[in-house]
């Protein structure tokens, strides 16, 4: 068996085109690089490089080995990262990836309670949208990720375990001078003829699918005229009387633009489901299990608060 670290040297030599250039990049001496290549060739039993006055190039065996090198080195990196994650968990850390609105509303209560119950365990909060968070979760870079799902549809991320936390209701966002602002609530179909501003550049994220599903149930195809990447921008565009939109309650907790009003949708209100995802169902009596339970409790507390009308909420503008 050969030393996989020598693959790094081989890859650098081929990339740089010469032993001396690779030595400079690796902070080795040229002699040390040559010795590493010779040792690798001895272990493999094949010549890996053709040396010439103008530099080096890989042989057929060298080229084939380099094709395997990326896979081998990636596996080694993944193993090191996984062991580092395990060491981190033993040292007392729960790492959670979350998108901004959930991090600002659901997680503070859970983290504060967790620190009381588990004072020796740190919580590391990593900003990430749901797709990025699941990627980090699968790679072992975090222990949990806050994600969104569309109720009634297949799981957004079937390769991970998820626990439902909170059904986040969407509200209609109207310009302050809109004809429907006199009503405290409104049916979604009342917005069928409006120009719509959508909160993402693509139609693949759960929030957009919630919107499209609500339109179908209300019996109309929306006229989407503008798209934005965040709800703050959406509210600014609505305030400029460029259209109407939807905003989830968690995003509205972050503040409402003075030029818009929020109105609750009666009947079948659009909802996205907030979940906390883990690589697999967490084992009992572990810090991760405690943290997941506290996030779910924070969701229950928020549900109780949502019993108030939209006009009574601090983020509502009448």
Image (cartoon, grey):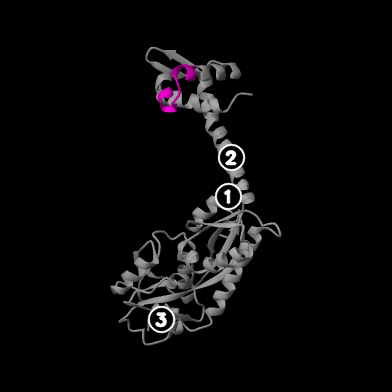
Residue 260 placement, left or right of 163: left
Q: Nearer the viewer, mark 2 or mark 3?
A: 2
Question: Where is residue 143 shown, x and y percent of the image?
Answer: 59, 54
Task: Name the image quarter holding the C terminus.
Answer: bottom left
- Does residue 192 appear anywhere in the picture? no
Residue 276 vertical placement versus 193 (above, below): above
Q: Secondary structure at mark 1?
A: helix
**Pointers 1 and 3 in contact (CB under 8 A)?**
no
Q: Is residue 260 left or right of residue 219?
A: left
Q: CA distance from mark 1 to mark 3?
A: 43 Å
Q: Is 44 positioned to the left or the right of 102 in the image?
A: right
Residue plotted at (57% across, 70% down): 298
**180 or 283, which is in the foreground?**
283
Residues in magenta? 22-34
Q: Which residue is mark 3?
A: 190
Q: From this viewpoint, is residue 286 visible?
A: yes
Q: Quadrant of residue 2?
A: top right
Question: Foreground mark, 2 or 1?
Answer: 2
Give the residue drawn at x 45%, y 69%: 211
Q: Name the residue at 51% across, 83% down.
A: 308
Q: Which mark is residue 138?
A: 1
Q: Main secondary structure of the magenta part?
A: helix
Q: Residues within 10 Å of mark 3 (few under 14, many from 20)?
A: few
Specify the label residue 26 is tagged with. Answer: none
Residue at image mark 2: 80
Residue 95 among those drawn in magenta = no
31 drawn magenta: yes
Return the disc, 1 or 3, that comes first in the chain's sequence. Answer: 1
């Amino acid at each position: 068996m050969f030393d996989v670290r020598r693959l790094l040297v081989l890859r650098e030599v081929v990339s740089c085109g010469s032993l001396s250039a690779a030595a400079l990049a690796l902070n080795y001496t040229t002699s040390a690089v040559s010795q590493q290549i010779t040792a690798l060739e001895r272990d493999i039993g094949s010549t890996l490089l053709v040396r010439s006055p103008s530099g080096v190039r890989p042989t057929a065996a060298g080229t084939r080995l380099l094709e395997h090198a990326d896979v081998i080195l990636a596996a080694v990196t993944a193993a090191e990262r996984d062991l580092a994650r395990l060491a981190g968990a033993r040292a007392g850390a729960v790492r959670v990836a979350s998108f901004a609105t959930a991090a600002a509303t659901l997680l503070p209560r859970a983290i504060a309670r967790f620190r009381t119950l588990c004072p020796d365990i740190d919580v590391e909060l990593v900003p990430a949208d749901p797709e990025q968070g699941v990627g980090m979760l699968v790679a072992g870079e975090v222990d949990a990720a806050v994600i969104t799902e569309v109720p009634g549809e297949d799981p957004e991320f079937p390769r991970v375990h998820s626990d439902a936390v909170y059904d986040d209701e969407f509200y209609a966002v109207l310009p302050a001078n809109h004809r429907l602002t006199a009503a405290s609530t409104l049916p979604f179909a009342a917005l069928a003829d409006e120009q719509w501003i959508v909160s993402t550049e693509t139609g693949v994220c759960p929030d957009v699918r919630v919107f499209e599903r609500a339109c179908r149930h209300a019996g109309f195809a929306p006229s989407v005229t503008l798209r934005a990447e965040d709800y703050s921008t959406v509210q600014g565009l609505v305030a400029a009387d460029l259209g109407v939109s939807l905003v989830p309650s968690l995003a509205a907790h972050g503040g409402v633009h003075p030029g818009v009003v929020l109105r609750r949708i009666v009947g079948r209100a659009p909802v996205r489901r907030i979940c906390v995802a883990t690589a697999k169902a967490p084992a009992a009596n572990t810090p991760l299990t405690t943290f997941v339970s506290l996030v779910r409790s924070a969701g229950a507390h928020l549900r109780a608060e949502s019993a108030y009308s939209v006009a009574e909420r601090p983020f509502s503008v009448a």
